[in-house]
Amino acid sequence: MSGTAAGSGGLSGAFRCAAASEVAAEPLAGTASTVRAFLLVEAPGPWGVDAVRDSRLPDDVKARLGELESRHRVRPLLVRRHGGARPATTRVFAAYADPARPWVGTTELADVRDLLDLELVGLGEGRSPGLAPYDEPLFLVCTHGRHDACCAERGRPLCAAMGEVAPEATWEVSHIGGDRFAANLLVLPHGLYYGRLGPADAAGLVQAHLAGRLDLEHLRGRSSYPFAVQAAEVYLRRRLDVTTVEPLAVRSRARDGAETRVVFAVEGEDWEVVVHTSRGAPRQLTCRAGSPSAGLAHTLVSLGRTAAR
């Protein structure tokens, strides 16, 4: 695996959660945040621990973003260009990572308060606010160092490398989840999360996505699926070497205790994947964590063809 070398420490010997996760050989599969609706707002200034709350955005805009998250199932994220450029306008993206029909729309606002006039309440249900369609992938690299040191130390070099090959599509993004898997990348519109990426992975991953293919080695999961279903899709793709960006069709899924059974349709055949979900031993999961907690792991139990339809 490429990326940053493993180790238990970081700068000046400080604890680094991403290095500890690598040492523990923590699986990536099934760890993507479960989100479908995203709202990206350009905010080039510094981001505090809580990006929206601690940003320099006007208070009424912060309140609007908080309401969208708490009441309407929309994940607000801040974005900025790598290198600290300060544009004259504010770029906004609305995205819905539906498995079948994902989309992204965009606009530029002369004043960030114009965000208050956008019809964003329906975004959580997949309704477009009427922005201009954006038909290319968005590569969003988490560099939110005030939230977790690993995101800055590993994310910024990755963002710089991705910006070399896809400058218009690449953005720094605030906390997207899974700090210990840094460097983390979210690709929209499909809601694909990647982890443990390094600068050497940037060109290949961009080229793969532009060609409609996934990087299965670093894929954490598809955000529109529950964790166990994410893992099942990743395990099946790895077994069959299916790299198409479009999701595998889910014919059925069922949970029985700690086991989740998912049936996917792949090229006219049904494949059943069973994964077991468990919690590991409590440990420090993020650089800023004040107490130990247990992360989830999804282990492959079985995988095979089902009876013919």
Image: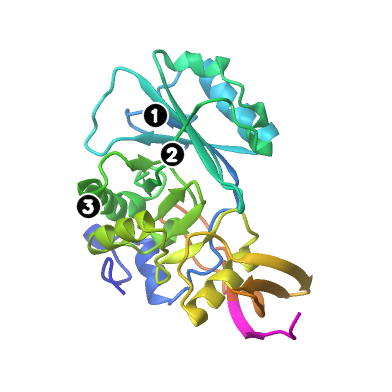
Element under disc 2: loop
Q: Position of residue 188 (x, y in %)?
A: 46, 47
Is 305 a magenta residue? yes
Say above or below: 108 vs 180.
Answer: above
Identified by mark 1, the residue type is Glu
The answer to whether mark 1 and mark 3 are in CB contact below 8 A is no
Separation of marks 1 and 2 at Cα, in angstroms: 17 Å
Name the spot of residue 148 as percent of width and height, x first.
39, 50
Per the rendering, the mark at residue 161 is: 3
Whichever of callouts 3 and 2 sits on the residue coming sooner in the sequence is 2
**Circle number at residue 42:** 1
Residue 55 in view: no
Quadrant position of the N terminus in the picture:
bottom left
What's the CA distance linking mark 3 and mark 2? 25 Å
Q: What is the CA distance from the residue labelled 1 to the residue labelled 3?
A: 20 Å
Report the residue marked by disc 2. 49
Q: Residue at x 31, y 55 (%)?
A: 206
Highlighted magenta segment, given as a residue range: 299-309
Tell me the quarter of the image containing the C terminus: bottom right
